[in-house]
Structure formats: structure tokens, C-alpha cells
Image (cartoon, rainbow, N blue to C red):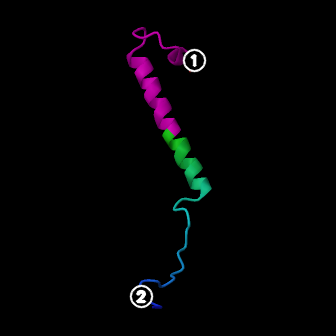
Amino acid sequence: MPGVGVQKTKVEVRPVLDPGQVQALNLMMLEDVTSVFHRVAEVGEGFTGDPRAQEQ
């Protein structure tokens, strides 16, 4: 039975973000994470022996 729920619609599979935007988003998130690490390092300075805090 043709046309009964078998309609072939052309589905356009396209990423919502282009690679450039994805890269920018990743950079922003990375900056956020880094700033959080810095803030934690500042607040907890001398409190934890976390090597990552001294690395930055």
C-alpha cells in the first residue's frame, strides 16, 4: 500500500553548529573550567596539595 506512512521525506541531516562554532564553544567552556580551577586554587591556596594548582 503505497503512501501509507511510507512517505519518503528528504531528511536533511545537518549539524546545528558548524565546526568553527563547536570549536569556539569548546574554547569558551575550557576557559570557564580553567577560571574555575584558578578560583578554586586561589580560595584553597595552601589548603590542598593539588599539583594542578601550582602548574598553572
Q: Amino acid at mark 2?
A: Val
Residue toward you, 49 or 54: 49
In-image side of 41 versus 12 (left or right) = left
Report the Cα–Cα distance between label 2 and label 1: 64 Å
Residue at the extreme right? 20
Query: Which disc number belongs to residue 35?
Result: none
- Judging by the rendered image, the residue that carries numbered circle 2 is 4
- Element at label 1: helix
Vertical arrangement, residue 6 with respect to residue 56, above or below: below
Horizontal and vertical percent for residue 35?
47, 30
Assign the C terminus to one quadrant of the image: top right
The mark total stands at 2
54 part of magenta stretch: yes
Q: Which residues are magenta?
A: 30-55
Majority secondary structure of magenta residues = helix
Residue displayed at 47% across by 91% down: 2
Residue displayed at 54% across by 44% down: 26
The mark that comes first in sequence, 2 or 1, is 2
Vertical arrangement, residue 43 with respect to residue 7, above or below: above
Q: Amino acid at mark 1?
A: Glu
Horizontal and vertical percent for residue 52?
53, 18
Residue at the extreme bottom? 2
Which mark is in front, 2 or 1?
Answer: 2
Horizontal and vertical percent for residue 25?
52, 48
CB under 8 Å between callouts 2 and 1?
no
- Judging by the rendered image, the residue that carries numbered circle 1 is 55
Residue displayed at 55% across by 68% down: 13
In-image side of 36 versus 23 (left or right) = left
Assign the N terminus to one quadrant of the image: bottom left
- Element at label 2: loop
In-image side of 4 versus 18 (left or right) = left
18 part of magenta stretch: no
